[in-house]
Image: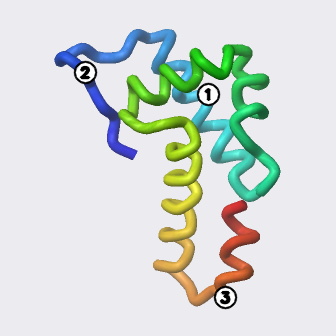
Amino acid sequence: MTRMVQDGQLPKLKDRLLIEKINMLLEENYTNSDYNLHNIYEAIEVSRTTQHRLIKKFYGITTTQYINDFRLEKARRIISTKAVKMKDLAKMVG
């Protein structure tokens, strides 16, 4: 994912750390199709609104789109390295 920098300012350290934690959580749980926004904001202990604003500020997209893009990127990487049936790929990326 491409980071969006608004007004030439780098994100605050606190925001970058939360983004890193979100990415770590997605990396650990993207194969779980039941893993969703609620799980993330519970784990990072911020409100849904705060999480949404952070993702929107950092990447310029919604949290739902970010999670979908994350999973699609994982799928793209898998199919670029080996032949996989679509139903198996769907299970691999949640």
Q: Quadrant of the C terminus?
A: bottom right
Which tag is nearer the camera, tag 3 or tag 1?
3
Q: Earlier in the sequence, mark 2 or mark 3?
A: 2
- Residue 80 pos. (x, y %): 47, 78
Amino acid type of disc 1? Lys
Q: Is residue 44 above or below residue 1?
A: above
Farthest left residue in view: 8
| Residue beneath the point at 78% across and 33% down | 39
For the residues marked 2 and 3, what is the alpha-carbon distance in whole angstroms? Answer: 40 Å
Q: CA distance from mark 3 to mark 1?
A: 31 Å
Kind of residue indicated by mark 3: Lys
Compared with 31, 37 (above or below) is above
Q: Amino acid at mark 2?
A: Gln
Res 85 label? 3
Q: Nearer the viewer, mark 1 or mark 2?
A: 2
Q: Nearer the viewer, residue 26 or 53?
A: 53
First in residue order: circle 3 vs circle 1: 1
Kind of element beneath mark 3 = loop
Residue at 36% across / 34% down in the picture? 60
Residue on which the image places disc 1: 21
Q: Secondary structure at mark 1?
A: helix
